[in-house]
């Protein structure tokens, strides 16, 4: 995970795969450094964040579609 201009980064801060459209990676493989202890908690945190990002995206898309739909009838 890193900045989009980084040569080592595969996903950006919103867990989207750099260079691919419509693809996110939401698992432990995005960690730049593996923690020394158990990776269960950090992996769950990544999954929760990924779920929130996806819900935010679809909420904005649905709101945009609804707005366009209702503007048609004005």
Image: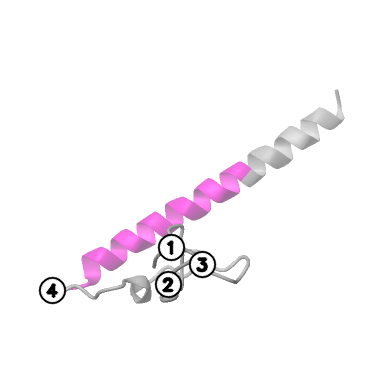
Judged from the image, the secondary structure of the residue bearing numbered disc 3 is loop
Label 3 crowd bin: few (<14), some (14–19), many (20+), radius 10 Å? some
Magenta residues span 36-60
Q: Is residue 45 magenta?
A: yes
Measured as percent of width and height from the top left, residue 35 is found at 19, 72
Instruction: Indicate which label's residue lies in the foreground, 4 or 1.
Output: 1
The residue at which mark 2 appears reads as 9
Q: Is residue 15 magenta?
A: no
Per the model, the C-alpha gap separating discs 4 and 2 is: 23 Å
Where residue 44 sits, quadrant-wise, is: bottom left
Q: Quadrant of the C terminus?
A: top right
Farthest-out residue, left: 37
Which mark is drawn over residue 24? 3
Which mark is drawn over residue 37? 4
Q: Is residue 74 left or right of residue 40?
A: right
Instruction: Indicate which label's residue lies in the foreground, 3 or 2.
Output: 2
């Amino acid at each position: 995970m890193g900045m989009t201009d980084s040569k080592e980064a595969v996903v950006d801060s919103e867990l989207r795969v750099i260079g691919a459209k419509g693809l996110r990676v939401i698992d432990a493989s995005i960690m730049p450094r593996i923690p020394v202890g158990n990776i269960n908690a950090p992996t769950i945190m990544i999954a929760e964040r990924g779920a929130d990002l996806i819900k935010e995206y679809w909420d904005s898309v649905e709101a945009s579609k609804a707005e366009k739909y209702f503007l048609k009838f004005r």
